[in-house]
Every structure is written in structure tokens, then in C-alpha cells.
């Protein structure tokens, strides 16, 4: 359970709010219902958690953001929280540019949705997106095959290249931007491929400043996913323990059977380890809020550990539930699918373990 400086009050508010709205029922309700839920979250200030007060945000930090991300994961809320509230603000708040401030203000006030295109950990084998200058201003050209929360966005933050240098650009969705929605295994998330055909854009950072913003966004994505996975895994484990206590076979609760008892105990130990590493990553980011150095790589370990644990816990929960757990009517398959997608949204979990190990070896001065 991620801890926050605001204590249990924020968590209680999140649980009460989401419990009243049952976000999981919106997974098959279409885009309109999901947009309405997001508008409510914006009104509550959740989208502005990491946005500075000077740009219309709450001015909180990762202690609070981690709690909200965990509770949204626990309820499978189909909202673009990762991109809008965590990833984009983490990058833009490191940049001194009027357009970066304007984008964060638009998110905080619910005037626009923002997505990131070309983030290196999500780019895969794509070619880079190029920025060209000209008499009519800067233009983006290129394709991004996967951009989280891009299916219903108004503004893009784009990782691109200009004259061999890494840049970060901001572009409005217009006729020169093509968006093709993906059909994902997990119905609680949205993603799309994006193509830019000389789309108007403004470069807001380049060189070291752009690299720093990209590193902050990648860390935010990893830790945000870790919190989401922890929330989902915690819910699934608790529901499965309750089921094992109530489900009776051979005149005994199935939780009294040794095979079930030991499986649930193993999952509990796994969940406690996940909680510890995710809390450590959140606290490390919280302590780095406002600093100029990129956050450390502990977020990569937290994401890898939590995402893999989520899939293990959800898969074993289905086995404990037996036949009912395999049916479409039960919600367990939705949690398993979210966990499976979480493992892929920021690159493979094995690559994140490699990244964390490389960082530790480098800190020790060891050759890799």
C-alpha cells in the first residue's frame, strides 16, 4: 500500500468516490461514459496532482499521485490518468517554456487531454519522428505505432529528432495528424497509432533539457504502472481470500484445504514484496520532486516486480475460483488482462530489470 503525506484521508476519499461509481461497469459502456468519469476526476483535482500550483495544479507530489494511481488500478477505472496526470506533467514541469505551462494548465482545468508519442520505452522498432523547420514554422513528420491514451486526445507531446538532436515538441491534433485506434486485450485502456504529415508543432525543449524531460516521463510511466499493478493485485488477492473463506466443498470452506491455503499464502508473500518495492520507488520519486537530476532507476525494478506479480496473482486467483473464475461474467479476467498489458506498456519487464541492474552496476563502478 503506497503511503502519502496526506495520510489515509486521500485513500478513503478515492475509495468512496470510485466505490460509488463502479468504474468496472464502464468498460463496456462506450467512450461517452468513460469521458464523463474522467471529467469528474478532473473536477476532483486528481488530474492536476503533479501539476504545480503556478500552472493551475494541486502542487502535490508522488506521495499523493501514487495513492490515486493505486486506487484507480484497484477499481480498473478506464481513464487516461497515466498519460495526463503522471507522464506528461512529469516531463513538462522540468521545462521552462510558455507552451509547456499552457499544456499543463489545460490538463488541470479539463480543457484538453494530452498523450505522448514517440516515448523511447514505447517506441519499439519505429523510426524516429522528425522535426523540420521552414518559413511556416516547425513541422512534424513520422509515425508512432503505439501511443497510450492517444485514441481520444487533443494534444500531443512528441519525442522527435531535429538535425540529429533529440527534441520535445507539442502539437495539436489536426488534419495533418492521423490517429488509428488499437483494439487492446485490456478494455480499460486506450491506445492508437499516430502519423504526422508535416503537422504544425512547437519545440519546447532540446538536447540535455529534452533528455531530462524524457527520463522523467519514462520514470513516471514505470512507477505509475507499478502503483496501478499493486492496486489491482491487492484487490484480486483480497477478493480471492474472501472467496476461499465462503466457498464450501465437501462441507468445508475451500480455504481450509492445504493446496488452497498454501497458494494464497505464497501470493500474500509476493504481494508484500510488491508493496515494499513500489513504496520505495514512490518515496524515491517523491524525494526527487523539483530536483534537476533525473529520477533513479528504482522505478524500473518496481514496475517489473509489480507487473509480473499482478499477472501471477490474477492467474492464480482464477484457479482458486475454479469454474466461475474462467467465465466472462466474472471480473477476474479483466484484472488479468490489465496486468498482462501493464507488463508491455513501458517495454518488457525483463528490459526494466536489466535497466535497474545496469544502473546499480554503474553506481558501483563496475564494467557492464
Image (cartoon, rainbow, N blue to C red):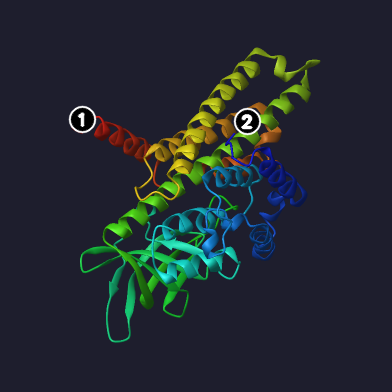
Q: Is residue 278 left or right of residue 16?
A: left
1 or 2: tag closer to the N-terminus: 2
Numbered disc in front, either 1 or 2: 1
Q: Which mark is residue 89?
A: none
Q: Please, what secondary structure does the residue beneath circle 2 have?
A: helix
Question: Could you tell me if residue 84 is visible in this image?
Answer: yes
Q: Is residue 293 left or right of residue 152?
A: left
Position of residue 357 measured from the top left corner of the image (x, y, whole percent): 31, 33
Residue count near mark 1 (Cα–Cα under 10 Å), binned few <14, some 14–19, many ≥20: few
Point 38% across, 73% down: residue: 196
Vertical placement of 92 versus 271: above or below? below
Farthest-out residue, bottom: 135
Vertical placement of 333 versus 136: above or below? above
Vertical placement of 79 versus 280: above or below? below
Question: Could you tell me if residue 151 is visible in this image?
Answer: no
Between 50 and 367, the one nearer to me in the picture: 50
Position of residue 117 measured from the top left corner of the image (x, y, whole percent): 41, 62
Vertical placement of 335 versus 241: above or below? below
Position of residue 192 measured from the top left corner of the image (x, y, whole percent): 48, 62
Between 314 and 363, the one nearer to me in the picture: 363
Mark 1 — residue?
Answer: 366
Q: Please, what secondary structure does the residue beneath circle 1 have?
A: loop
Mark 2 — residue?
Answer: 317
**Quarter of the figure that contains the C terminus:** top left
Residue count near mark 2 (Cα–Cα under 10 Å), binned few <14, some 14–19, many ≥20: many
Point 32% across, 86% down: residue: 136
Position of residue 84 measured from the top left corner of the image (x, y, whole percent): 53, 59
Farthest-out residue, front: 54
Point 55% across, 26% down: residue: 272
Residue 5 sits in quarter: top right
Amino acid at each position: 500500500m503506497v503511503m502519502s503525506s496526506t495520510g489515509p484521508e486521500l485513500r478513503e476519499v478515492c475509495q468512496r468516490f470510485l466505490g460509488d461509481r463502479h468504474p468496472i461497469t464502464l468498460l463496456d459502456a462506450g467512450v461517452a461514459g468513460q469521458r464523463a468519469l474522467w471529467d469528474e476526476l478532473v473536477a476532483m483535482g486528481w488530474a492536476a496532482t503533479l501539476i504545480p500550483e503556478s500552472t493551475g495544479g494541486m502542487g502535490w507530489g508522488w506521495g499523493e499521485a501514487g495513492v490515486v494511481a493505486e486506487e484507480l488500478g484497484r477499481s480498473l477505472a478506464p481513464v487516461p490518468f497515466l498519460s495526463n496526470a503522471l507522464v506528461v506533467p512529469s516531463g513538462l514541469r522540468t521545462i521552462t517554456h510558455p507552451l509547456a505551462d499552457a499544456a499543463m494548465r489545460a490538463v488541470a482545468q479539463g480543457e484538453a487531454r494530452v498523450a505522448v508519442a514517440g516515448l523511447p520505452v514505447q517506441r519499439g522498432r519505429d523510426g524516429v519522428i522528425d522535426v523540420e523547420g521552414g518559413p511556416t514554422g516547425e513541422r512534424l513528420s513520422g509515425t508512432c505505432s503505439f501511443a497510450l491514451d492517444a485514441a481520444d486526445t487533443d494534444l500531443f507531446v512528441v519525442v522527435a529528432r531535429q538535425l540529429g538532436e533529440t527534441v520535445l515538441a507539442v502539437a495539436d491534433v489536426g488534419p495533418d495528424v492521423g490517429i488509428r485506434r488499437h483494439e487492446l486485450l485490456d478494455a480499460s485502456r486506450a491506445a492508437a497509432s499516430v502519423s504526422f504529415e508535416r503537422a504544425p508543432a512547437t519545440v519546447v525543449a532540446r538536447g540535455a533539457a529534452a533528455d531530462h524531460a524524457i527520463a522523467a516521463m519514462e520514470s513516471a510511466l514505470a512507477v505509475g504502472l507499478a502503483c496501478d499493478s499493486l492496486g489491482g493485485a491487492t484487490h484480486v488477492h483480497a477478493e480471492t481470500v474472501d472467496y476461499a473463506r465462503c466457498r464450501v466443498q465437501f462441507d468445508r470452506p475451500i480455504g481450509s484445504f492445504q493446496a488452497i491455503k498454501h497458494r494464497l499464502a505464497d501470493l500474500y508473500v509476493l504481494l508484500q514484496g510488491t508493496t515494499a518495492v513500489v513504496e520505495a520507488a514512490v518515496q524515491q520519486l517523491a524525494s526527487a520532486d523539483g530536483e534537476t537530476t533525473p529520477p533513479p532507476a528504482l522505478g524500473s525494478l518496481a514496475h517489473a516486480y509489480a507487473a509480473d506479480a499482478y499477472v501471477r496473482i490474477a492467474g492464480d486467483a482464477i484457479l482458486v475460483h475454479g469454474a466461475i473464475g474462467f467465465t466472462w461474467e466474472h471480473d477476474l479476467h479483466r484484472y488479468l488482462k490489465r496486468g498482462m498489458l501493464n507488463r508491455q506498456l513501458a517495454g518488457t519487464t525483463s528490459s526494466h530489470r536489466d535497466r535497474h541492474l545496469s544502473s546499480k552496476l554503474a553506481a558501483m563502478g563496475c564494467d557492464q
